[in-house]
Amino acid sequence: MPIPVDSVPTDRRLLRDDVYRRLRDAIVDGTFTPGEQLKDLELADWLGVSRTPVREAIMRLAESGLVVAVPGRSTTVSDMEPRAIAEARNVVAAMHELAVRESVPSLTAEHLEDMREANRRFRAAIEAGDADAALVADEQLHRVPVEVAGNRSLAKVLDQFTPVVRRAERLRFATADGHESAARHDELIRLCAAPDAEGAAALAFDTWHSLPPHDEA
């Protein structure tokens, strides 16, 4: 497995969640490609941690469907299977619909400005052809209603299934479809500001549910 040579070593006090996020993001952004074998010792050396948090992170990645782990044998990055993406997409869409519906009554002017600023960064990233920056900005925008809703069960479900969707979404943001996403964001913010909780919730669902599985992208 080729380990990136330009990564800055991680503090040895790295928490388990940080290890998970680093590995998750490396799969989502294509650093680790479908079918690639992941060796916990190499990953531990790369991150500057012991093998224990790496193994725990791999278990979480397997639960999310990002890797296929065979105990005692091997761990490989999962393929981008259309059915798996579609199933995760449906769950993520439903969770964001609920988050928006619950959060709209509590969104402040500052929250709305945070969403607008994230969409400005998103649009700039799309114009620059930077899919990775677009993913970050998109995450920041949609995180606002999720955090305001304060539904821990909802957030936990999103944490598990969103990474599967993000792999396909990255492909979308590398195409002209990214401009359509920016327009959807504008309308979502407008409905949140209205405030139209039901309209915003419906649009949030449609936005995530419009993502095609990999073979249709």
Image: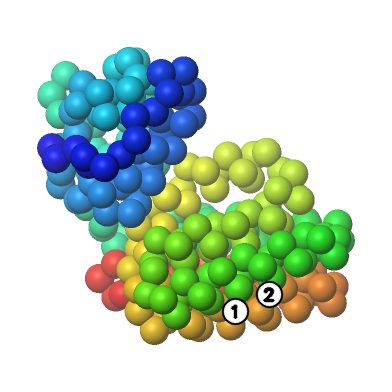
Q: Quadrant of residue 59?
A: top left
- Looking at this view, is 23 or 146 the one in front? 23
Q: Position of residue 65 (x, y in %)?
A: 34, 43
Residue under circle 2? 188
The residue tagged with tag 1: helix, strand or loop?
helix
Residue drawn at the location 41% of the way across and 33% of the way down: 20
The residue tagged with tag 2: helix, strand or loop?
helix
Which label number is shown at residue 78?
Answer: none
Q: Is residue 10 left or right of residue 75?
A: right
Q: Position of residue 147 (x, y in %)?
A: 70, 48
Q: Position of residue 31 (x, y in %)?
A: 26, 49
Which label number is shown at residue 184?
Answer: 1
Q: Is residue 193 left or right of residue 4?
A: right
Q: Amino acid at mark 1?
A: Arg
- Looking at this view, is 3 or 105 the one in front? 3
Q: Quadrant of residue 46?
A: top left
Residue drawn at the location 31% of the way across and 75% of the way down: 217
Residue drawn at the location 59% of the way across and 79% of the way down: 184
